[in-house]
């Protein structure tokens, strides 16, 4: 019997403020698992009942008041949960859950990597230093990943030339500097993971998931970046049958500056 599973990942930029558009995502696309980042919500204030009314009984959260925060919301039970405090700063940036699929399981890791501030110099910008250290720790930990695994989330790096609207103009802009791109690739390759989004969209084609609030007409300007990612080990990646960036969601009422990404697995 075929098992089908749709996973969504979305930096929602405040889950309580933007709950109506998360509900719209659910009603329009019915993903089985939703990974949210930048929930900006303490655990005690997370809107559990709203999601349970929509059929998501299984909810894992790691939040904090006003900043950061990750949540994984599922129609399927979690086989286990883990939360790692990367860089021991007390930030809520990582959540791992075991997901049953096709008579087996995989580990789903939900990340919100630090943005890194504006100045790409770790000597004068503590936020950028934190981002680089976070990526280094990810690479160290990913070297021991085994079994079926998927990594999703706002990784805050657009690593390839056509992951940004202008490779030349963004080379000195945080999120596309060479050192960030190199470190993110080191994370992915440390565990031998496949870039699932780029398996569907060739490297020579533009692919964005984020458009700045600063643009008066974000869609017409189309100065985007791909900051959100889906990676998986080759066996699991081979079971991905579709991938979609819901660009239209960037234009929904009171939108996040990120669009959700949906990946469908079949086995």
Image (cartoon, rainbow, N blue to C red):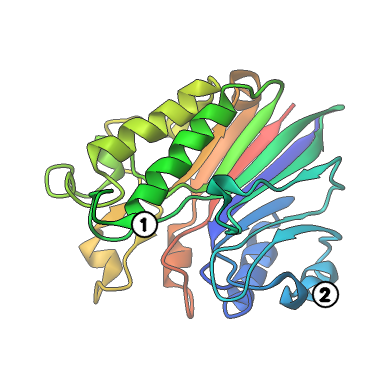
> Could you say whether the residue bearing mark 1 is in a helix, strand or loop?
helix
The x and y percentages for residue 94 are 62, 49
The x and y percentages for residue 195 are 48, 30
143 or 49: nearer the eye? Answer: 143
240 or 153: nearer the eye? Answer: 153
Image-quadrant location for residue 29: bottom right
Residue at coordinates 82% horizontally, 75% vertically from top-left?
A: 49
The x and y percentages for residue 92 are 61, 58
Image-quadrant location for residue 41: bottom right
Q: Which residue is mark 1?
A: 127
> Could you say whether the residue bearing mark 2 is in a helix, strand or loop?
helix
- Badge nearest the viewer, 1 or 2: 1
The x and y percentages for residue 43 are 73, 70
| 79 left or right of 257 in image | right
User: Visible in this render: residue 54?
Assistant: yes
Residue at coordinates 84% horizontally, 45% vertically from top-left?
A: 78
């Amino acid at each position: 019997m075929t098992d089908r599973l749709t996973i969504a990942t979305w930096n929602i930029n405040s889950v309580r403020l933007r709950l109506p558009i998360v509900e719209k995502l659910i009603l329009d696309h019915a993903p089985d698992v939703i990974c949210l980042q930048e929930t900006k919500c303490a655990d005690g204030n997370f809107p559990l009942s709203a999601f349970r009314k929509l059929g998501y009984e299984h909810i894992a959260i790691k939040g904090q008041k006003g900043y950061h925060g990750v949540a994984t919301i599922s129609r399927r039970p979690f086989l286990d949960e883990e939360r790692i405090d990367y860089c021991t700063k007390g930030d809520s940036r990582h959540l791992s859950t075991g997901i049953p699929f096709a008579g087996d399981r995989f580990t789903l890791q939900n990340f919100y990597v630090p943005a890194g501030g504006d100045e790409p110099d770790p000597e004068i910008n503590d936020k950028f230093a934190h981002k680089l250290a976070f990526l280094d720790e990810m690479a160290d930990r990913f070297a021991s990943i085994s079994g079926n695994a998927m990594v999703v989330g706002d990784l805050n790096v657009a690593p390839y030339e056509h992951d940004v609207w202008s490779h030349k103009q963004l080379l000195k802009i945080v999120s596309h500097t060479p050192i960030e791109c190199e470190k993110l690739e080191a994370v992915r390759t440390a565990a031998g993971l496949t870039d699932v989004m780029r398996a569907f969209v060739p490297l020579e084609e533009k692919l964005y998931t984020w458009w700045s609030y600063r643009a008066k007409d974000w869609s017409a300007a189309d100065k985007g970046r791909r900051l959100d990612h889906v990676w998986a080990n080759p066996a699991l990646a081979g079971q991905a049958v579709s991938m979609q960036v819901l660009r239209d969601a960037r234009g929904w009422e009171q939108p996040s500056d990120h669009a959700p990404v949906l990946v469908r697995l079949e086995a």
